Image (tube, helix red, strand yellow):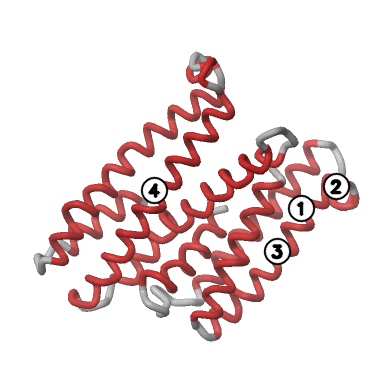
C-alpha cells in the first residue's frame, strides 16, 4: 500500500498541486511501483503459507482470483508508470492516478471490507476512500517536500496553498471514513470493545497518532501557509512541520 500511496500522491501532486509538472524526478516512480509489487508478492506468499499450499495452488483456487485481479491492475499500473516516467503529462499522470486508485479498490475488495453483508458496498466505499485520501495526503506530503526543495521562494507559494486545500479535504474524508469503519466494527452499544478487543486497542493507538498529525497539519494551514502567502519567510518552518507529519 505504501507504494500505491506514493504513486497516487505523485499523480495528485502533479495534477493539482504543481500544475502539471512532476514534483520530483519521475524515475522514482519505478521504485514506488516495485515497492507495491513486492508487497503484493509477499501477501501472496503469506496467504499460501497460511493455508499450507503452494503459490500455484493458491492462485488456481477461487481464493487466488482476487490476487490475480489485483496483479493484473498492478501490471497495468506498471505500464502507466513507465509512460509517466518517459513523459510527464496530464494524461500520463491521470492514468497513474486512475490505475493506482483501481488497484487500491481491488486490494480493499479482497480484504475484510469486502465480506458479504448488508453494509458491504458502504464498507467497500468507505475503506477505499480512506486509502485513496491517505495516499493523497501522506503520499502528497513527501512529494510536497520534493517539489518545493529547490524552487525559489516565490514559486513555492501557489503549490503550498493548493496542497493545504487538498490536505484539508483529505483529512476530513479520512476522519469521516475512519469513524464509520470503527462504528461498524465496534458499534455504539459496545464501546467497552475499545479497550477489551485487539481492534479497539489498535483503534485507540491510531487515534493517538492521528491527533498530533492533524495538529501539525492545522499548524501549517492556519499559521505557516498564511505567513508564506503574506511574504514572511516561513518556508523552513513549513518544511520542518511537514517532515514531522511524514
For label 4, the SS is: helix
For label 3, the SS is: helix
For label 2, the SS is: helix
Residue situated in front as seen by the camera: 119 or 227 = 119
Q: Earlier in the sequence, mark 3 or mark 4?
A: 3
Q: Earlier in the sequence, mark 3 or mark 2?
A: 2
Left or right, residue 44 beside residue 232: right
Q: Earlier in the sequence, mark 4 or mark 2?
A: 2
Q: From mark 4 to mark 2, how far is it between C-alphas?
A: 37 Å
Q: Do tag 4 and tag 1 residues touch (Cβ < 8 Å)?
A: no
Q: Do tag 3 and tag 2 residues touch (Cβ < 8 Å)?
A: no
Q: Which residue is mark 1?
A: 67
Q: Earlier in the sequence, mark 4 or mark 1?
A: 1
Return the x and y of residue 9 as percentages of the image width and height: 46, 63
Q: Earlier in the sequence, mark 3 or mark 1?
A: 1
**Labels 3, 4: front one:** 4
Q: Which residue is mark 2?
A: 58
**Labels 4, 2: front one:** 4
Residue at x 42%, y 41% (from the top left corner): 175
Q: Residue furthest front?
A: 118
Q: Which residue is mark 3?
A: 73
Return the x and y of residue 142 as percentages of the image width and height: 39, 61
Q: Do tag 4 and tag 2 residues touch (Cβ < 8 Å)?
A: no
Relative vertical location of residue 135 with respect to residue 198 in this rendering, above or below: below
Q: Which residue is mark 4?
A: 171
Q: From mark 3 to mark 4, how far is it between C-alphas?
A: 27 Å
Amino acid at each position: 500500500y505504501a507504494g500505491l500511496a506514493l504513486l497516487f500522491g505523485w499523480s495528485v501532486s502533479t495534477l493539482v498541486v504543481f500544475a502539471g509538472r512532476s514534483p520530483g524526478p519521475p524515475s522514482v516512480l519505478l521504485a514506488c511501483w516495485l515497492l507495491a509489487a513486492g508487497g503484493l508478492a509477499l501477501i501472496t506468499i503469506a496467504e499460501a503459507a497460511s493455508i499450507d499450499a503452494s503459490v500455484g495452488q493458491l492462485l488456481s483456487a477461487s481464493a487466488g482470483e482476487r490476487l490475480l485481479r489485483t496483479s493484473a491492475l498492478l501490471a497495468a499500473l506498471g505500464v502507466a508508470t513507465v509512460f509517466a516516467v518517459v513523459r510527464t503529462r496530464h494524461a500520463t499522470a491521470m492514468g497513474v492516478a486512475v490505475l493506482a486508485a483501481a488497484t487500491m479498490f481491488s486490494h480493499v475488495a479482497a480484504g475484510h471490507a469486502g465480506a458479504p453483508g448488508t453494509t458491504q458496498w458502504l464498507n467497500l466505499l468507505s475503506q477505499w476512500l480512506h486509502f485513496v485520501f491517505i495516499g493523497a495526503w501522506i503520499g502528497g506530503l513527501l512529494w510536497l517536500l520534493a517539489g518545493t526543495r529547490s524552487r525559489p521562494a516565490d514559486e513555492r507559494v501557489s503549490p503550498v496553498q493548493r496542497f493545504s486545500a487538498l490536505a484539508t479535504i483529505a483529512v476530513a474524508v479520512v476522519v469521516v471514513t475512519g469513524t464509520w469503519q470503527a462504528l461498524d466494527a465496534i458499534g455504539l452499544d459496545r464501546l467497552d470493545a475499545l479497550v477489551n478487543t485487539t481492534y479497539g486497542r489498535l483503534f485507540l493507538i491510531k487515534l493517538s497518532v492521528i491527533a498530533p498529525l492533524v495538529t501539525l497539519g492545522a499548524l501549517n494551514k492556519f499559521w505557516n501557509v498564511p505567513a508564506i502567502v503574506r511574504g514572511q519567510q516561513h518556508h523552513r518552518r513549513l518544511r520542518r512541520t511537514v517532515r514531522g507529519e511524514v
